[in-house]
Image (cartoon, grey):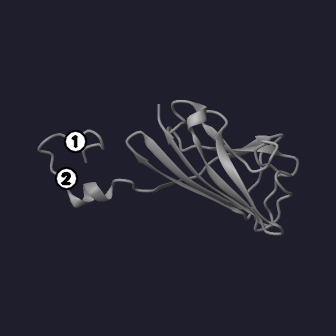
Amino acid sequence: MTALGAFSSGDVLTAADLNAIGTWTTYTPTWTGSGGTPTLGDGTMTAEYLQINDLVHIRFFLTWGSTTSAAGISEWRFTFPSGLNCGQSLFECIGSANVHDANVGYYPGVVIAVSSTTFGVVANQSGNTIGAAVPMTWVSTDKVGAMITYRLA
């Protein structure tokens, strides 16, 4: 297939070419934090992205399980897809998030690029990224979901 944005007069596009535009690809983010590395245990973490030219869109979900552990680990970070680092400026790699506390309710949040390869979720008034005790103490079935869009450099 001719790369998006590189079509020339006379190119013939097939149905397969058109169907490949915006195909979601799964990836496994690396989950780290300040003071240690969280353990997913029986929790679930899913992520997928699509890339159209230099635009990247990510869907990310983490559900806490009964054996998930991050005691004492703050400032959680998750990696962008390999090779699709945050581009122009860290301020341009942003998104929306929602943290669900199974015992209380929802915390709206924002996604921020912490570096060109990692992002965090801010869901409290202090501006700290989520962690073992932020915005709440995490228990089984608590969740965080995020949507991130950015342009590659």
Image-based side of 119 in relation to 148, left or right? right
Q: Residue furthest left?
A: 10
* Residue 11 location (% of width, % of height): 15, 46
- Image vertical order of residue 61 relative to residue 83, above or below: below
What residue is pinned by disc 2? Answer: 13
Taking the image as shown, residue 47 lies to the left or right of residue 109, namely left
Kind of residue at badge 1: Phe
**87 in relation to 56, above or below:** above
Q: Quadrant of residue 114?
A: top right
> Residue 30: image x %, image y %?
65, 46
The disc label shown at residue 7, or none: 1
At mark 1, the secondary structure is loop
Amino acid type for the residue under numbered disc 2: Leu
Marks 1 and 2 in Cβ contact (< 8 Å): yes
Q: What residue is rendered at 78% in x and 42% in y?
A: 127
Q: Residue at x 77, y 49 (%)?
A: 130
Q: Nearer the viewer, residue 52 or 140?
A: 52
Residue 4 to residue 44: above or below: above
Residue located 47% across and 31% down the image: 153
Q: Secondary structure at mark 2?
A: loop
Q: Which residue shows up at 88% across the image and 47% down it? A: 72
Looking at marks 1 and 2 on the same chain, the residue that comes earlier in the sequence is marked by 1
